[in-house]
Image (spheres, helix red, strand yellow):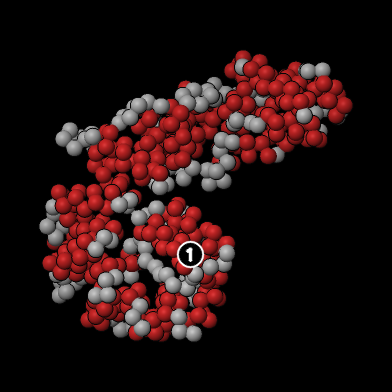
Amino acid sequence: MKQIISTAAFIMGLAIPLAAQDIQRALMAVELEQYRKAKVELAPLVEQGNAEAQYHFGNLYFYARGVSRNVEEADTWYRLSFKKLMPLAKQGGVEAQFLIGDMYLSGKGVEKNFDLAIEWLTRSAQKGNAEAQEALGYMHERGMGIPKDIEKGIYWYEMAANQGYTSAMVLLGWFYQHADFKYRNLKKAEEWLMRAAKSGDVYAMTQLARFYCCGFGGAVIDKSKEFSWHARAAEKGMVSSQLFLAKYFDDDQDKYQSNPKLAFKWFLKAAKHGDYYAQYKLGYAYYTGKGTHKDDNEAVKWFRKASGQGYDGSHWFLGSMYENGRGVPQSNLLAYMWFNLASKEDDSNNFSESSATAQRDRVAKKLSANEIRAAQAMSTECFNSSFKNCEHKKVFAKPEMLTVASYLGSAEFCAAYGVDYRETANRVLGGINQFYEFDDNFTKIDFNTAVENGHFGELFSLQANSYVSLSKESADIFESCKDAHLQVIKIAKAK
């Protein structure tokens, strides 16, 4: 089944025409591995309670398409879909019968049950549904809930393929390439893959490229054909083929194929569809000027996108950029945070001078003990939020975080976190000025008096001296942070 061996595979038919068109676009995006786009297309229909959309939304999580695999999340959507599809299946809905059968086959939202899977898939297949026919072929070929019968498997595959269902053509190509010696037939494998590819099936193009790539099943290796089919698929928007071309042209070891500008072009296309490795490579291209112009702001943007998906290589470069103030305000705190996150992937038995662990420990020498604790807390917050709460004002959602930022007296907190001072002013003047760290004899009235007299910065300077041992770096740049605090007063008074 294409759902099992490929990236796509699904149906239309139960929804109104406009919804069906949206689902069609979503499934095409899945076919091209453009999972972010697929999710955007499905989301409105999911919210409207569309059963098909809920099923396909569950597939994104079940097969880890653009999201981390989450069976519980997938089952939530499958169960909602199942309740709506079952009545339609009982009424004879061909597509509903296929989906119900597929749910029982794979245990999607229901307990896996091969008998019920065969029952519903057979009903749909006998009415001509190609996807159900392919699924039955897969069950017979693999002996899933029924005695293994290769001949019946081929029969159902060909029933679907002869209807023009390219997924079944690809599966036949796969089968004849990898089957036991008795059934292996490389000529048939190539013919079926070629037929599907020439019909415009992008996934078939990638499978044909792999057919020529590595000699699986004894196939003849032909690198020129491999490249040609990946190129066709990439032009149609297939992300994995775009990455193939990008890596091909990014090979510095081969002066004849190395082409940094073309590598950049294809990395950019794949990155825009959310591929984290491509995003990292774009960041590196802008960081070094390889294949494009140097642009630290763009480098930071793409490194952040990749790091947001947990790619540790980007964590290292963000640490370096914050330490050196490239594309971001210089910040040893954030440099430590990013190096600390990247260090989780270091080999504990082999720390080189350039390793994230070594870089983190070197930056730590520039920070006070309190700042290191703060940076470690920031690392934990970033990691626990799946890299969502790392560099923005959400860190300051708790009042105590506002005071920590101010008490440290570091402009790094002000600039690097991009604090919205209007929001800060509202918090301070709206009652959150009763900070827990203040001495009991320092009242809200004292605080407001200091604010009104324009002594906001001096106030926090005094508190910082009382509670925090500032590093020389923090003390040196406290004046600039004080200016930021004074801006809070101006904004608050303007309101």
Residue 468 rendering spot, x and y as whole percentages: 69, 24
Relative horizontal placement of residue 230, taking residue 384 as reference (left or right):
left
Q: Residue at x 75, y 33 (%)?
A: 426
Q: Give the vertical position of 173 relative to 150 (above or below).
A: above
Q: Quadrant of the C terminus?
A: top right
Residue 5, image x, y percentages: 32, 64
Q: Residue at x 51, y 26 (%)?
A: 328
Q: Residue at x 28, y 61 (%)?
A: 201
Residue 336 visible somewhere in the drawing? yes
Find residue 2 and report its image quarter: bottom left
Secondary structure beneath dot 1 equals helix
**Is residue 473 left or right of 144 when viewed as pictured?**
right
Category of crowding for the residue at label 1, using alpha-carbon neighbours closer than 10 angstroms: few (below 14), some (14–19), many (at least 20): few
Whether residue 117 is visible: no
The count of marks equals 1
Whether 380 is drawn above or below 451: the answer is: below
In the displayed structure, 308 sits above or below 361; it is below
Residue 388 picture location, percent across and down:
55, 43
Towards the viewer: 321 or 238: 238
- Residue at screen point 73% across, 36% down: 399
Residue 7 percent coordinates (x, y):
36, 60
Q: Nearer the viewer, residue 16 or 381?
A: 16
Quadrant for the N terminus, please: bottom left
Query: Is 179 located above or below residue 282 in the figure?
Result: below
The amino acid on which the numbered mark 1 sits, given as a three-letter code, is: Leu
* Extreme-front residue of the structure: 17
Residue at the disc numbered 1? 18
Q: Is residue 192 left or right of residue 402?
A: left
